[in-house]
Image (spheres, helix red, strand yellow):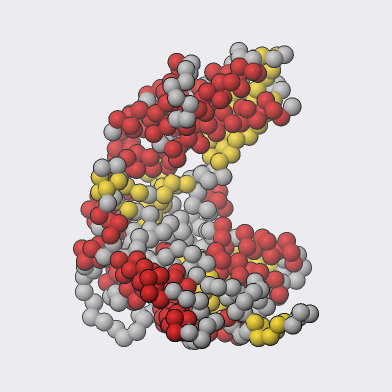
Amino acid sequence: MSPLAAVPPRGPARQSHAWDVARVRADFPILKRLVRGRPLVYLDSAATAQKPRAVIDAITAYYESGNANVHRGVHALSQEATTAYERVRELAARFLNAESHAEIVFTAGTTAGLNLVAQSYGGSVLRPGDEILVSEMEHHSNIIPWHLVAERTGAVVRPIPVMESGGLDLAAFEQLLGPRTRVVAVTHASNVMGAINPINAIAAMAHEAGAVVVVDGAQSAPHLRVDVQAIDCDFFACSGHKLYGPTGIGLLYGKRRLLESMPPWQGGGGMIREVLIERSTYAPPPERFEAGTPPIAEVVGLGAALDYVMSWDWEALVAYEQGLVAEASRQIGEIPGVRIMGEGADRVSVLSFMLDGIHPHDAGTVLDTLGIAVRAGHHCAQPLMRRFGVSATLRASFGAYNTLEEVGALVEGLGQARKVLLG
Amino acid sequence: MSELDDLYQSVILDHNRAPKNFRRLDDATHHAEGRNPLCGDHFDVWLKLDGEVIAEAAFLGQGCAISKASASMMTQAVKGKTVEEARALFETFHDVVTGSGGPAPLPSKLEVFRGVSAFPIRVKCATLSWHAMKQALEAT
């Protein structure tokens, strides 16, 4: 079964209709600007998505009329800020279909969420010789936190191989699972190839072996209907800024009994039960993991982003984005000397490729002069680059506001790049 | 498109396709590696000094057209120069591609890199092998 089909709908089924991309584009002020004298063609939403007016306005309104610290004051503004802040936690729980809002921790982003899990959960359960399985397609932010905790605990990090098709080698994964496996760290969707991993199958196998599954959801949350209960992951981290919200805010979902078993990650205000000079006791999750004044304006902005995306018809969105990436893949695939990385994978709307004889940075510069923004580089996934024997790729990623015309502009721009660079 | 034509002049594309001194120097006296962790590009630069004079210069590695052509032309430019002259050339080249030094006189062959200053993000590409060359001279 396709991983796309495996994701159940969120909320009541809606009547499916076509995606109104013109209406969505009108919500994003930045899409009106020119770059180097041409209309911006923004194909880098996997790095960060643009922000709708509603998010920008919510942050401004918060600072203009609602700014106060949360969970502290008895005054009206503080109570309003606390209500607004906790409402976003409820929204986030609904967005990810968590069982309870107490399973949602606000973090600085996906990276912070994964570091929290590695340090707090990994740091308390890992023993010398224990194994952490990390897929070869992980972003560095789901690799390095495990290196750091492995160095501290004596645990070992082992790779789950990626097949030429772009999928994870599940047969090899099954072989790697054993009595020492404690953690399986895997991305829901590759930030390079877009390849979607079957988390529910991976989780079933990992749980059988007694391991927990830590999912990097940075690239899936904006493109798939994520249901953390259906995929049965133990932890799921994602970023607000890739979800059309502000930078500096992310979500970490953790199963309640796991979060309750974990020690704090950072100490400070807001995460305590009682503090004596010699020792302290800690608040229950999620407050236990939110030391210090949180990024309140960013949480409010994320709330506006969640309100915005949860008003969408996600069935239409997924179908639309799938159409964009399929068409991009088809047209780019026709360019002579092109190689699409992980061509056989089911993917979110993220596509990586290499042009024969052209370094991705050079092609990226040519596209930039045409107002087309793509990413060129290793995408913080060096093990995956090594797996496919390249040092860098060009990556085009499509969001809710991209159009088929922009796919055409990209393909035309790549033709221009070939002309300039190959002569 | 004129900025682009300025950046990708045919000399640069020729050096990218067929770089000069693109080999390991087995009897090198100096060596350093240039690595750009942001993009993964890397070059090894070898120098063979005869007294104060750079008798041979060579490089290997991978990178974009700008970085590869720059490395190729760097090895040509420093060959036969004294260590002091090579260091001075590094400074001039650096000022020209960053656009910070005004119209500093460059050896005419290196003039093609003046266009890089219009693309600040690509300055690191142009200077990668030059930094490695300078570092190699300091290594011993």
Task: Give A193 or A174, whichever is nearer the viewer.
Answer: A193
Q: Is residue A356 above or below residue B77?
A: below
Task: Give A410 or A283, whichever is nearer the viewer.
Answer: A283
Q: Is residue B92 above or below residue A30?
A: above
Residue A344: quadrant of the picture: bottom left
Residue A154: where, in percent of width, then height?
Answer: 75, 65
Q: Is residue A279 visible?
A: yes
Residue A361: where, in percent of width, then height?
Answer: 43, 41
Q: Is residue A344 visible?
A: no
Task: Give A22 or B56, whichever is nearer the viewer.
Answer: A22
Write the residue at 34% across / 39% down. A366
Count of numbered labels shown in the rendering: 0
Write the residue at 56% across / 21% down. B89
Task: Give A138 or B140, whichever is nearer the viewer.
Answer: B140
Residue A123: quadrant of the picture: bottom right
- Residue A183 lies left or right of residue A57; in this view the side is right
Write the residue at 35% across / 80% down. A9
Residue A214: where, in percent of width, then height?
Answer: 57, 71
- Residue A124 lies left or right of residue B111; in this view the side is right
Write the residue at 51% across / 86% down. A74
Q: Is residue A232 above or below residue B137?
A: below
- Residue B75 lies left or right of residue A86; in this view the side is right
Residue A69: where, in percent of width, then height?
Answer: 50, 76
Q: Quick one: which residue is furthest to the front in this view?
A: A75
- Residue A224 lies left or right of residue B38; in this view the side is left
Q: Quadrant of the N terminus of chain A?
A: bottom left
Q: Quick one: which residue is furthest to the right in this view?
A: A278
